Image: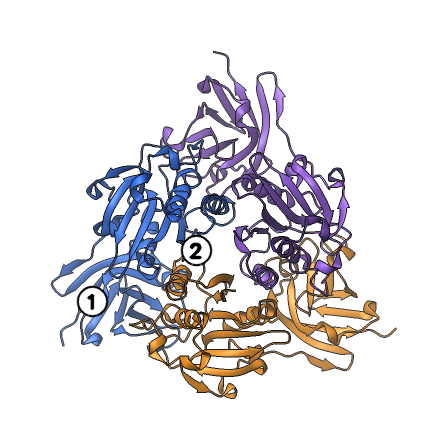
Chain colours: A purple, B blue, C orange
Amino acid sequence: MSPLIALLSDFGTREAYVGVMKGVILALAPEARLVDLTHEIAPQAVSEAAYTLVSAVDYFPSQTIFCCVVDPGVGSERRALAVQLALTRSSAVVVCPDNGLLTPLLARVRQAVVLDNPRYHLVPVSATFHGRDIFAPAAAHLARGVPLGELGSPLSPEALVRLEWPEPQVQDDGFRAHVIHVDRFGNLITNLPGDWLSPPWERWEVRLAAQRIRGIRRTYAEVAPGEALAYVGSGGYLELAVRQGSARDAWGADVGTDLEVVKLEP
Amino acid sequence: MSPLIALLSDFGTREAYVGVMKGVILALAPEARLVDLTHEIAPQAVSEAAYTLVSAVDYFPSQTIFCCVVDPGVGSERRALAVQLALTRSSAVVVCPDNGLLTPLLARVRQAVVLDNPRYHLVPVSATFHGRDIFAPAAAHLARGVPLGELGSPLSPEALVRLEWPEPQVQDDGFRAHVIHVDRFGNLITNLPGDWLSPPWERWEVRLAAQRIRGIRRTYAEVAPGEALAYVGSGGYLELAVRQGSARDAWGADVGTDLEVVKLEP
Amino acid sequence: MSPLIALLSDFGTREAYVGVMKGVILALAPEARLVDLTHEIAPQAVSEAAYTLVSAVDYFPSQTIFCCVVDPGVGSERRALAVQLALTRSSAVVVCPDNGLLTPLLARVRQAVVLDNPRYHLVPVSATFHGRDIFAPAAAHLARGVPLGELGSPLSPEALVRLEWPEPQVQDDGFRAHVIHVDRFGNLITNLPGDWLSPPWERWEVRLAAQRIRGIRRTYAEVAPGEALAYVGSGGYLELAVRQGSARDAWGADVGTDLEVVKLEP
């Protein structure tokens, strides 16, 4: 089957930036199949891009090439990367700037190269649009079968830039966590892995500002429309929602909001 | 030719939800071609999804698989469906929740099954993202050639959930109708079929709140910029617009707004 | 390789208009590959569409078919076109209304036809959605291999509609230019070609309202976050930006805003 390239950026869909990247890819690798992951990452929000990538990467065919361009440092000395990932059930390749976008996947990196072989750049390389001139060509050449190691100099996976990545903390009576993403529906995705929680589910209480949400539910339908609930979301993390409403709007919560998840005494 | 899957959802394009569904599909059915119908259905607006699907379905190649996920009842007892449709000039398959999304197409349903064969689910099935775990895999397996009947238990087409679907009413001097959709341009699409109207076109008057729009036009260009007009739209229904402006903004109209369409005495 | 069709419109992605065009194309030309350039052109903004097309066309494979539908005159006597372009390194075909959308590409037009051969229309042709009924079918038939000349009557390239297209002016001490596009990041793209500028780069000053921006930089990283800079953008034109900020928001600038680019005495 022809290779699959998944695209992720903060370019939006109003300008032709993404279209131009696709044109560049298809001019070099006409056989490639293209899928958009999203182009609506908030401008230059590297950690949002990192979250989006890690939440999606496991669901794609093995050796999908992820071309990820959220690049506030374009034109500076920041490195451009291609990496090979070993995932739980599959594998993947990512091309992206070395700015922390790979943080939650760093333990999966098996090989990394700096995209410094000019033979695989679009010339002249602009100082402001490496998506077009470096990352799209790299993805296309990988799709054509060029080995990762050909694209540039090897780099130790330990040398990659790492963002501060919030981890939940264990407390006496439960956990301290926080919101790492708010989706389109206003659902709050936290950084607490669902498998840190255990039955009996009704003993858990989530405390977010003045809100108290009792019990871990299986699904929205267990509460009435307009009511709050906590549940383990499809990504495997604790989520908070208002059924047929927006938890963000209802509670004024956002990325970074702290919460406590407490197991009450029986 | 490889099978075509058209996707419709309220997931938006900011998160990776749609990308993940595409990854799941392409992992199972690498040959499938994917087209987006829209992912900007208002959150959980089943009737808007129903309108969008019925307005598009006739223009696709026969046996296109429509994967439609607007699913406020995810995780409840609502059924997941695959149905075979017989259309005027073609045919189509739809996978979707049984929540009324098929209402305007119910008369076209030739076969329906409940997606209850776990062999065709992504395991484990989450309680909140059946787009990924049930509907995308069903579309992919259909694209691979799995017969509809294999995906689960047969269901009588009469048993499908039906939304209240507004129909225009005949009155002494014309019709009572209402707005069922407002498009990006602020054009008001009504539920009055264009073929209920007849010449002489200049005798018709549309009354919407204080607005009086005289005559049924063929196209925008028949009125001056900024003027209102009524015409039979590309979907075959009466539409109201302000040329190079927004009828919604000008008149404060929205989905559900009533109107009268009256044939005046000569 | 199967033919590539790139789509550009002001239809947005909320309605199924674009999906319907894709359905029509794939019903006629199942082999075609589709790429979206953008569908977020402001409603009926022909000059924005013209800018977007010219900024992208050079990066696509030769003979890509651009199907561009920003069409305020739909249903009037405005002509529908297909044109063959000769580009610097490649070639392209464009189908679009004859409303000035090709203005910055007029010098590249090698052949033009009016899409008046009804054999290649979707019948009946509506008065309001030629994207579906004329432009998408034309693109599909071209993708199938129908020669351009078959689609309708020949037209002299000189006869095509031309928009007023702002050109920068040479002044005693530099240039007078203006903003022709504002991108998602709030960067201001001007109509001043980068190759009108020359070293020493630090002698240039850009004056936009009360702003004075000294020097032409190579990239964002040369200034501190929050600072303004001028640079030659990836499209080859002078651009103005605030690093990790929005020049539009900071300065109240927008499309049409005037600026002066002055070479200061040493």
Spot occupied by residue B127 in the image (x, y as percentages of width and height): 42, 32
Tell me which residue sits at (27%, 51%) in the image: B85
- According to the picture, the residue beneath numbered tag 1 turns out to be B195
| Near-viewer residue (A112 or A163) | A112
A157 horizontally vs B29: left or right? right
Q: Position of residue A222 (x, y in %)?
A: 37, 28
Give the CA separation, mark 2 to mark 1. Answer: 31 Å
Task: Say if labels 2 and 1 share a chain.
Answer: yes
- Image position of C249 (left or right of A204): right
Which residue is painted at 50% across and 45% down in the image?
B23
Does any portion of residue B163 appear in the rendered image?
Answer: no
**Which element carries disc 2, helix, strand or loop?**
strand
* Residue B140: x %, y % from top left: 41, 45
Instruction: Kindly identify which numbered label has been placed on residue B114.
Output: none
In this view, B228 is above or below B176: below
Disc 2 residue type?
Val
Which residue carries the number 2 mark? Answer: B35
Question: Local crowd at mark 1 within 10 Å, few (<14), some, or many (≥20)?
Answer: few
Q: Quadrant of residue C146?
A: bottom left
Q: Is residue A189 visible?
A: yes
Task: Name the outermost residue toward the top.
Answer: A266
Which residue occupies 65% across, 58% down?
A137
Compared to residue C60, the image places residue B255 above or below, namely: above
Mark 2 vs 1, N-terminal side: 2
